Amino acid sequence: MFWRLIQDRLIAALADTPVVFLRGARQTGKTTLVQMLAAGPYPAHYVTLDNVGILSAASSDPSGFIDGLEKPVVIDEAQRIPDLLLAIKEDVDRNRQPGRYILTGSADILTLPRVADALTGRMEVVTLWPLSVSESSGGSSTIIDELFHPETIWSLKPNPVFDIFATLAGGGFPEPLQRTDQQRRQAWFDAYITTILERDIRNLAQIKDIASVPRLLNLLATRLATLLNQSEISRSSSIPNSTLSRYMALFKALFLIQELPAWSVNLGKRLVKSPKLMVVDTGLACALLGIDENGLRQGGEIVGRILENFVCLELFKHASWANKSVRLYHFRVQTGHEVDIVIEDNRGAIVGVEVKLSGTPSSKDFAGLRILQSHLKEKFICGVLVYTGNETVPFGRDLYAVPINSLIAGVQK
């Protein structure tokens, strides 16, 4: 069992909020985490809507079902009955005691308008991502907090056993991560996609041409870490733009893809408005692309983009439990200069992160970071080039090249 670093945030939310919704992709470990909480630090009754009898009872009389549950209670896969969440709202309005409900879901209930409106002000949402490198190796680092205190970068040392290509291919889903045989890992991801098609997508949407969905997922994987151009994807997939918009919303609701929005100094004017497209897990992306660890070691443009996707998702994961509240963006100007990831805190302070599949950083790799630095002045905390070498190297005031095996997988001295 892996220790999940989001646990402390969950317990803190339960101390002052009536409903906590733990959301995330299927098979990220939500059930394991809430069962562990219910058996220990958060004693609670546990029910799952994966049980046919419980599902039937909850569907036929949501209010009666909720009234009959012992509180506090964990309700697993709560999105399967949207009306159940309206019944929870009625119960919470009668008794706003903190920690009455933990809900889990592999589909984002906030995409259901009635539910989102009903639970406003009553629910805190916590996202459980696939395992971070820190979690899978038993660590407890918080990259976000370290980047906003760049002096700590020098206290990191490389992890000598970290293999970036094996990590990219393995991804962060707990079960395939533990499979060393590539064929068995591929079989897991194939079954994963099939389960989502046959269960989640059919439950959430009326899609006539279900066979087009895996083809679209494969196509999106080839576009990872690039600007999202929906018109181009529509042409390439022969899926009408209106239909494609529904599919994309569905993929986001099921935590298969993640968008990285554009950023600019003026929040009303994005320099390049298109978001970047990320796949939620590099193991899943590699399975969709048909590329294994050996293929990753060959290098090439797609491997560089998989690496960028990986670093971006690691930052999303760490942001979910960091002490500092941040939002993630990308930055690009019309000249083509860009910063792969922009991390902004609530005061407008910025850290820029550029990702490079190279063992030898150069000054030109910092061009986008320098543009960002010149715009922000004192609000620019630091710019970091994440690369595949072994030494942390300064490249000017508040600019550093940092090895990926130090920042992502490093350990404190």
Image: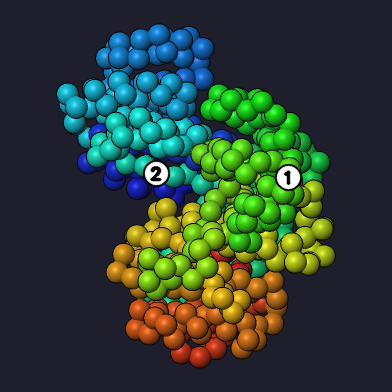
**Is residue 173 in sight in this rendering?**
no
Residue, disc 1:
237
Q: Amino acid at mark 2?
A: Val
Residue 55 in the image, given as x and y percentages of width and height: 46, 14
Residue, disc 2:
126
Q: Residue at x 63, y 28 (%)?
A: 207
100 to the left or right of 357:
left
N-terminal-most mark, 2 or 1: 2
Task: Label 1: state its secondary structure.
Answer: helix
312 to the left or right of 56:
right
Task: Label 2: state its secondary structure.
Answer: strand
Q: Which of the 4 quarters of the picture holds residue 240?
A: top right
Residue 307 in the image, given as x and y percentages of width and height: 66, 63
Q: Nearer the viewer, residue 296 or 176?
A: 296
79 to the left or right of 25:
left
Q: Residue at x 65, y 83 (%)?
A: 361
Residue 227 in the image, given as x and y percentages of width and height: 61, 61
Q: Which mark is residue 297?
A: none
Residue 411 in the image, given as x and y percentages of width and height: 52, 67
Q: Residue at x 81, y 41 (%)?
A: 183
**Is residue 323 in sight in this rendering?**
yes
Quadrant that contains the N terminus? top right
Marker count (numbered): 2
Q: Sort mark 1 into few (<14), some (14-19) or many (20+) by Cα contacts within 10 Å.
A: some
Give me the C-alpha separation between circle 2 and circle 1: 34 Å
